Amino acid sequence: MTTTLQKTPEPADLQSELQEHQLPTWVPKGVVAGAAVIGVLLAVTGIVSIAQAVLIGWLLTWALPIASRVVEGGRKATDRTVTLLVSSAFGLALIPLGSILWLVISRGGPQLSTEFFTYSMRNVVGEGGGIYHALVGTLLITAAATIISVPIGLFTAIYLVEYGDGNRLSRSITFLVDVMTGIPSIVAGLFAYALFVIFFGEGVRLGIGGAVALAVLMVPIVVRACEEMLKLVPNELREASYALGVPKWRTVVKVVLPTAISGIVTGVTLAIARVIGETAPLLIIAGLTDSVNFNLFSERMTTLPVFTYFSVKFPGVPPEASIDRGWGAALVLIIIVMLLNLVARAVSYFFSPKGER
């Protein structure tokens, strides 16, 4: 009885067999580019609207999975179909963001000037004036809210991770932090107003009250961010410090916090970006003024979100100049938030361990 041994395919033959029924690598990019060109031409010539052109271009991209099923088979066609669906969902999510940015930049961009940043609205009717008073108020109130919330949030996170050890108090704090994360922002404004009414009476409007309201919103975000960063610190570092006889508090200060500092700073920066655009709580407690106010503990103080709201809601006569200033203030606020996010990314990159960059 003879046994016939089958010849093992050579690597080159196996690779040739696997690539025998595959579309060229340029086909996916070519299909997408062709669909985009056709859509642009239809929109430019005015045959269809922009939305219809986008829809037609998207439908044309489905030629790729159809061709893949004919040439490559069902498995590869399914993979290309899922890839196309995921990419389409990503593009769909970008539409609102892109439209908002386009609208704000196109309407607010022409308003940016030296006068716009250096003049307030005091004694200004109609054209002219600027956002200097609102910009000062935004920076001061946000800075005060950060000074209030960061120590509270950081110390709470340190207790939960380093000292709580899952006891009843730490579980209660975690539950309350979760509840505070979801409270409406106007509730924070009502809380700050009720607190300051006790000391100053009805109708109180103070910049520090707005800072307290924003701090209520920032604290749970800071707690969560710092808690997650502290949990990422390896226990081996703590144990090595304890083995050298270093007290727990000193281990936290000298080992744990320096290791997690990049993540903590990033979380704090993102928390600032989260609350800097709040309007409802500041409408209640900080109020509105056309003058520059550098004192958080005296009189009303305007912020960019509140200025934008009143510029569009109550534009006066003629309304065009006020509405344009509102769009300009909205653009400045978006720029500030973008810069804060870039700062968070930079801090995370430069202060993180070299192996994690």
Image (spheres, rainbow, N blue to C red):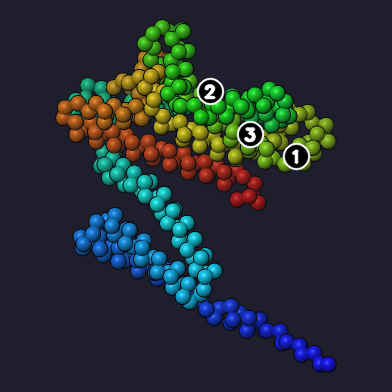
Distance from disc 3 to disc 2, alpha carbons, whole Å, reads 18 Å
Specify the quadrant that holds the N terminus: bottom right
| Residue in view at x 62 percent, y 45 percent | 352
The answer to the question of whether label 1 and label 2 lie on touching residues, with beta carbons closer than 8 A, is no
Say left or right for 318 vs 324. left
Distance from disc 1 to disc 2, alpha carbons, whole Å, reads 30 Å
Q: Mark 3 or mark 2: which comes first in sequence?
A: 2
Q: In the rendered image, which residue does mark 2 sit on?
A: 148
| Residue in view at x 47 percent, y 63 percent | 81
Q: In the rendered image, which residue does mark 1 sit on?
A: 235
Taking the view exactly as shown, the residue that stands out farthest to the front is: 1
Residue type beneath disc 3? Glu
Residue 263 location (% of width, % of height): 59, 39
Near mark 2 (Cα within 10 A), the count class, few <14, some 14-19 or many ≥20, is some
- Which quarter of the picture shows residue 256? top right
| Residue in view at x 52 percent, y 78 percent | 21
Q: Mark 1 or mark 2: which comes first in sequence?
A: 2
**Residue 299: mark in rendering:** none
Residue 199 location (% of width, % of height): 46, 7
Near mark 1 (Cα within 10 A), the count class, few <14, some 14-19 or many ≥20, is few
The answer to the question of whether label 3 and label 1 lie on touching residues, with beta carbons closer than 8 A, is no
Q: In the rendered view, tell whether residue 229 sits above or below residue 189.
A: below
- Which quarter of the picture shows residue 40? bottom left
Say left or right for 263 vs 271. right
- Report helix, strand or loop for mark 1: helix
Residue 188 location (% of width, % of height): 46, 22
